[in-house]
Image (cartoon, rainbow, N blue to C red):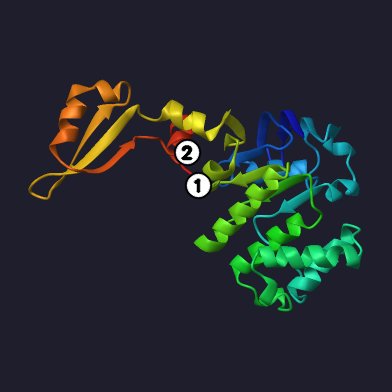
Amino acid sequence: MIHVDQLYYRYPGQHHDTLKGLSFQVAPGEMFGFLGPSGSGKSTTQKLLIGLLHGHRGNAQLFNKDIAQWRADIYRRIGVGFELPNHYSKLTALENMHLFASLYGLSKSQATPRIQQLLADTGLSDQAHLRTEEFSKGMKMRLNFARALLPNPDLLFLDEPTSGLDPVNASNIRNMIRQHKEQGKTIFLTTHNMYDADELCDRVAFMVDGELKKIDAPRQMKKQFGESTVTLEQRNDAGQLISADFPLQQLADNPAFLQQLARYPVETLHSKEASLEDVFIKVTGAQLT
């Protein structure tokens, strides 16, 4: 679905490359996370892939066709949700959606039921006739996401899709993303939100200073860099919370663990799994800011 090999890019007037030899592939139906701090080159990569930037070196393909060969027809096969929502502020949400539907070549009869469903799914039905200049940031982000889904794309590019959303709406957007993956859609998620990446992605790529440092499944990364121990927390007779760590391997046959387990009631028992952010810092030495 996406093939990138030794991709370089330098902005006009700059002396150094922003992208430095990126190579990766995204399979059909995969949800791929592109992770890194601000300024690492994530959005530049997405802009190149969707045709907003030109002049790259190396190879990049969408749907087995070089990105330089695609014209406007690519936008009928991809959906794009930008990090900063851009709507026509004097138009209502409904008018914005119909305008973009016409750009996709959808007739009004084709577009109307889909627009109504997307506004309902993103919780914007009641604000459909409100000008977007009156929208909060969260409402603009939800409309931005709905618009990305409008052409029913095979490939979806999402840049920080839950930014500015409250927990309820962020959870709803994540569920909608999962539903589209279940329908066989391919999703390229650009974010520095490690929770979203961990929850949603089949694989993630760590990006720092224009370079890819590691690509793997979140579960494998956390397993590799986590500690193979469990922490037992108990409440002693004096009401104090006490804890002890034990090796995870052969835990059931560990006499020290079994002896401690029998002493007091168990409050919690959990493995020491590294978070995806912990792994990112260990691998790259960079902070997610």
Which of 243/156 is in front?
Answer: 243
Query: At label 2, which amino acid type do we have?
Result: Leu
Determine crowd level at label 1: few under 14, some 14-19, many 20+ residues with C-alpha closer than 10 A: few
Picture quadrant of residue 40: top right
Determine crowd level at label 2: few under 14, some 14-19, many 20+ residues with C-alpha closer than 10 A: many
The label shown at residue 276 is 2
Q: Position of residue 285 (x, y in %)?
A: 45, 34
Q: How many marks?
A: 2
Q: Is residue 277 left or right of residue 258?
A: right
Which of 36/130 is in front?
Answer: 130
Whether residue 146 is visible here, answered yes or no, is yes
Q: Residue at x 48, y 36 (%)?
A: 280
Q: Which residue is mark 1?
A: 195
2 shown above or below 110 = above
Q: Residue at x 11, y 50 (%)?
A: 239
Looking at the image, do the residues carrying marks 2 and 1 touch, with CB atoms under 8 Å apart?
yes
Q: Residue at x 74, y 56 (%)?
A: 148
Whether residue 13 is visible here, answered yes or no, is no
Element under disc 2: helix
Which of 242/278 is in front?
Answer: 242
Q: Position of residue 133 (x, y in %)?
A: 69, 75
